[in-house]
Image (cartoon, grey):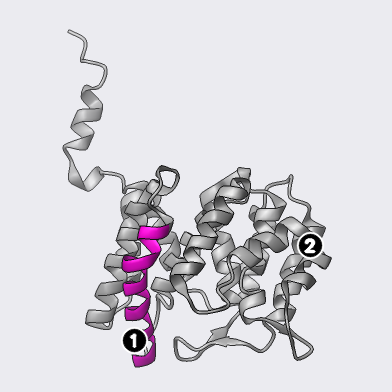
Amino acid sequence: MARPENEGFRHHKELPHLEQPHPADLLVASVVEYASISDESELKRKFWDILPRHIDRVHAGRAVSFADQSHEEQERKLRIPPVPFIVHPLAVTHLFLEHVGDKITLEQFQIMVLHDTVEDGEIDGRPVTTRLIEAKFGERVAFGVNAMTNDDGDAVRYYRELEQADRDRPELRLIDGKVIDRMFNLLDPASGMLLPSTQTKRQEKIADTKNRFIPTLLAGPRHKHWEKPLGRVLQLSEESVQKGTVPTEWAAKVRTREA
């Protein structure tokens, strides 16, 4: 007698050691892996290997060069030794590209690469402005970068304005970008020893994510799919603060199950 069509599938599911990891855990494993990178040249090389063919390399390269110049000599002092600041926007852009895949647009790519230039960047000793971004990359990219910039410290107002900007320009996927940025910040650094100052900042970021970020940005049905991966990131981030550990071992186990 022939076996039922799905019998093999049921048998597969009954073997825990063969179960594939949830897609949300695969994404979070990528966040951990990118948060472990300290070499900016590695990230830049990978762009040109994985960018879809429809993305203009010249215009994409201009955004990377501008971000590089804007964050020149800046460091993220979250680990010992500190890493170049440019590693952060490059890694977040890689994660966004991994999430969106071939559907990514040039404007989305540019916004992600440039997302911290107005908030933290400067060129020739002068702060980078939204007007300068618009002059070099156009109104839509400037709109996206401005929407992702919290320049007054009021988190609730910033999240509400970002939520409105995402509704006005859904094709830019601004909340998707911001969630990926937040997940990275909750786990960076994902290698080495956590500094006391890093643990304090992580505690503050965890509280903000739970009390303001999620209730404001993920309340609608369009972004409910982020609840599971962000929940996993919060769990790993809280464990890192409590135990002073980093989640590289967890990510390695996820990759083992994937294989």
Q: Nearer the viewer, residue 168 or 8?
A: 168
Are discs 2 and 1 less than 8 Å apart at CB?
A: no
Question: Residue at 39% across / 72% down in the picture?
Answer: 187
Q: Mark 1 sits on what residue? A: 200
Other residues around mark 2 within 10 Å, as few (<14) / some (14–19) / many (≥20): some
N-terminal-most mark, 2 or 1 = 2
Q: Establish if 57 lies above or below 245.
A: above
Q: CA distance from mark 2 to mark 1?
A: 36 Å
Q: Nearer the viewer, residue 159 or 15?
A: 159
Magenta highlight range: 196-216
**SS for dot 1:** helix
Question: Residue at 62% across / 43% down in the picture?
Answer: 103
Q: Establish if 7 lies above or below 146.
A: above
Other residues around mark 1 within 10 Å, as few (<14) / some (14–19) / many (≥20): few
Q: Mark 2 sits on what residue? A: 137
The percent coordinates of residue 154 (x first, y second) are 48, 76
Q: Is residue 155 magenta?
A: no
Identified by mark 2, the residue type is Phe
Q: Is residue 208 magenta?
A: yes
Say which mark, if any, is on residue 213: none
The percent coordinates of residue 242 (x first, y second) are 22, 80
Q: Establish if 118 lies above or below 170.
A: below
**For the image shown, how many numbered marks are present on the structure?**
2
The percent coordinates of residue 164 (x first, y second) are 54, 55
Identified by mark 1, the residue type is Thr
**SS for dot 2:** helix
Task: Point out the residue furthest to the top here.
Answer: 1
Q: Establish if 202 lies above or below 25.
A: below
Residue 193 appears in the figure: no
Prevalent SS, magenta region: helix
